[in-house]
Amino acid sequence: MTTTTEKPRPAAAPRPAPRSLAAAENAFLAFARRAGLPALRVSLAITFLWFGALKITNDTPVGEFVAGTVDWIPGVAGSWFVPFLGVVEVLLGLALLCNTGLRVVLPLLFAHLVGTFLALVTQPDVTFQDGNPVMLTTEGEFVVKNLILLSAVLVLYGRRKA
């Protein structure tokens, strides 16, 4: 009976990526650098144009929710505030789309988006399940997703040309 013991093989050195893969990655990186910021600006513009238009026409599914966020402010009624907010959102979206006045538009967008978090304070019964601040409702998720839009505004503002 013969026994053989195998010697452990040394770990194989990582192989470099094939040239075609590296070339594809470099091409995608060049594309991302060229198109990333304009794509972010245009997608943000489309979002605000679309959401704003729905508010203007009273076809938004969040009309009552938005109205309930500001109804406690004296002199502010959701009946006029929601369409007014829609007009503001459309104007901001148009400015983004046209790449105009971003020095003013982006801080206004930032302020508007920060304001959406007011709903978490004024309507916790609507934004949280059973008062649990970890368990969001659909409306709560609608508000919290604005963290992404806030980040987009910050990126655009930080990269804009003076």
Image (spheres, rainbow, N blue to C red):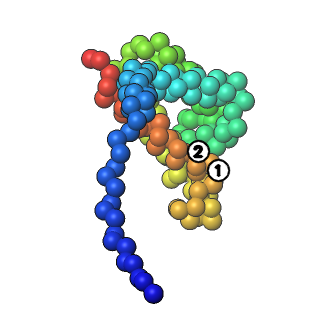
Q: Quadrant of residue 52?
A: top right
Task: State the mark number for residue 32.
Answer: none
Amino acid of disc 1: Thr
Task: State the mark number for residue 142.
Answer: 2
State the residue in front, 6 or 111: 6
Residue depicted at x 51% and y 53%: 121
- Is 17 situated above or below 123? above
State the residue in front, 30 or 41: 30
Figure quadrant of the N terminus = bottom left
On the image, the x and y values in percent for residue 127 come to 59, 53
- Disc 2 crowd rating (10 Å Cα; few below 14, some 14-19, many 20+) is some
Amino acid of disc 2: Phe
Q: Residue furthest left?
A: 162
On the image, the x and y values in percent for residue 103 come to 34, 20
Residue 49, visible in the rendered structure: yes
- Is 34 situated above or below 153? above
Marks 2 and 1 sit apart, C-alpha to C-alpha, by: 6 Å
State the residue in front, 23 or 159: 23
Q: Element at badge 2?
A: helix
Task: State the mark number for residue 138.
Answer: 1
Residue depicted at x 62% and y 48%: 139
Query: Relative to 46, is 103 on the left or the right?
Result: left
Q: Residue furthest right?
A: 59
- Is 78 situated above or below 37? below
Q: Residue furthest front?
A: 1
- Disc 1 crowd rating (10 Å Cα; few below 14, some 14-19, many 20+) is few
Residue depicted at x 58% and y 49%: 141
Q: Element at badge 1?
A: helix
Figure quadrant of the C terminus = top left
Check contact, mark 2 vs mark 1: CB within 8 A. Answer: yes
On the image, the x and y values in percent for residue 65 come to 64, 43
State the residue in front, 10 or 162: 10
